[in-house]
């Protein structure tokens, strides 16, 4: 009789392996589908606007600092290398647009150079980041 009771008690133990498998699969799914915040690599004081509008598809993020230095993918880039770098990043996600984060103290010539490079690559969705205010 005792052996039968021990067997019945052992059968009641729950196996957690399938539950852990499901948790790991969900974790992998959320990591793969997560949207990460992109940064330019430079602290920028964006100008204030009243007509700010959020952009959903952004593949390129270019920053222009207060010293008019251009930053792409957390690296300082020379004006001559802006177009090749943008072409490479745009090839990775051709459906997205370009957002230029220009400091309020930066020179307009740098922003125009970035916009011209984007136009030559074929990027039609170009926006300049601003603060609502």
Image: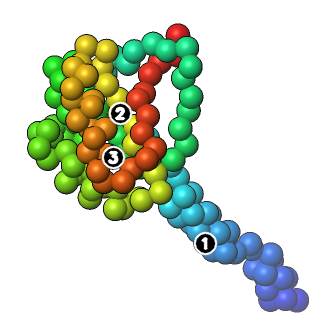
Q: Which mark is residue 119?
A: 3
Q: Is residue 27 left or right of residue 10?
A: left
Disc with the residue nearer the chain's start (2 vs 3) = 2
Give the label, 3 or 1, closer to the camera.
3
Toward the viewer: 128 or 112?
112
Q: Nearer the viewer, residue 126 or 57?
A: 126
Along the polypeptide, which appears first: circle 3 or circle 1? 1
Q: Residues within 10 Å of mark 3 (few under 14, many from 20)?
A: some
- Between the residue at mark 2 and the residue at mark 3, the CA separation in whole angstroms equals 13 Å
Does 3 sit left or right of 127 as displayed? right
**For this view, does 37 lie left or right of residue 80?**
right
Question: Does the rendering let one see residue 3?
Answer: yes
- Front position among marks 2 and 3: 3
Q: Identify the residue at horizontal 41%, vertical 29% (top origin).
A: 128
Q: Earlier in the sequence, mark 2 or mark 1?
A: 1
Residue displayed at 36% across by 54% down? 122
Disc marking residue 75: none
Residue 52: % across, % down = 54, 23
| SS of the residue under disc 1 | helix
Against 13, residue 114 (above or below) is: above
Kindly indicate the quadrant of the structure image that contains residue 73.
top left
Q: CA distance from mark 3 to mark 1?
A: 48 Å
Above or below, 30 against 109 in this view is below
* Residue 36 makes an appearance in the image: no
Residue assigned mark 1: 21
Task: Name the secondary structure under disc 3.
Answer: helix
On the image, the x and y values in percent for residue 44 come to 31, 22
- Which residue is tagged 2? 100
């Amino acid at each position: 009789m005792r052996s039968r009771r021990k067997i019945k008690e052992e059968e009641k133990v729950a196996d957690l392996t399938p539950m852990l498998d499901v948790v790991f699969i969900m974790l992998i799914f959320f990591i793969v589908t997560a949207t990460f915040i992109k940064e330019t690599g430079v602290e920028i004081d964006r100008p204030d606007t009243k007509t700010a509008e959020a952009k959903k598809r952004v593949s390129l993020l270019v920053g222009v600092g207060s010293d008019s230095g251009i930053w792409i993918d957390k690296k300082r880039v020379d004006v001559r290398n802006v177009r090749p770098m943008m072409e490479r990043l745009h090839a990775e996600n051709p459906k997205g647009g370009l957002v230029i984060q220009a400091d309020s103290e930066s020179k307009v010539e740098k922003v125009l150079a970035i916009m011209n490079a984007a136009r030559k690559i074929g990027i039609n969705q170009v926006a300049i980041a601003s603060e609502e205010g």
